[in-house]
Amino acid sequence: MVGGIIHGMLIKIDKAGRIVVPKRMRDRHGLRPSAAVEAIEQADGVLLRVAEQRPSMIKVDGLWVHQGAADSSVNWDLILEEVRAERDEFVSEG
């Protein structure tokens, strides 16, 4: 072990395709149950790393922008119509 980091550790894959990350490694990287881990294919193998936590909304030039993927099962045109109708109603009442 160099500087508290484990090098060359063998981890076995079970019949269900699962691996167990050693406790010291989980603790060091803050991995808790249900934590997201990203699997990245590389030419020489697979890299596992803690998934980057990004907010789903960010402000760009004063406007809120969603960074995630839109749910394809949702009727976005209908939702937009409803939001516009609510806005128009609010403006006409005010």
Image: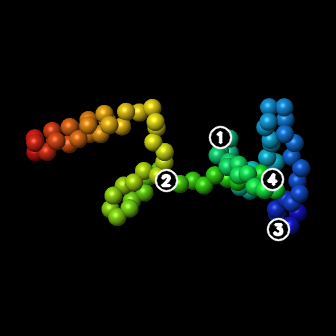
Q: Where in the figure is residue 45, as x and y percent of width and height? A: 80, 53
Say which quarter of the image contains residue 34: top right
Dot 3 alpha-carbon crowd within 10 angstroms: few under 14, some 14 to 19, many 20 or more: few
- Identified by mark 3, the residue type is Gly
Q: Which residue is mark 3?
A: 3
Work out whether 29 lies above or below 89: below
Give the spatial CA distance, label 3 vs label 2: 32 Å
Q: Which residue is mark 1?
A: 34
Circles 3 and 1 in contact, beta carbons < 8 Å: no
Dot 2 alpha-carbon crowd within 10 angstroms: few under 14, some 14 to 19, many 20 or more: few
Give the spatial CA distance, label 1 vs label 4: 24 Å
Report helix, strand or loop for mark 2: loop
Task: Indicate which disc residue 55 carries.
Answer: 2
Q: Which residue is mark 4?
A: 45
Q: Which quadrant would the N terminus be assigned to in this image?
A: bottom right
Task: In this rendered view, identify the residue nearer to me: 68 or 26.
Answer: 68
- Identified by mark 1, the residue type is Ser
Which callout, 3 or 2, points at the residue further toward the start of the chain?
3
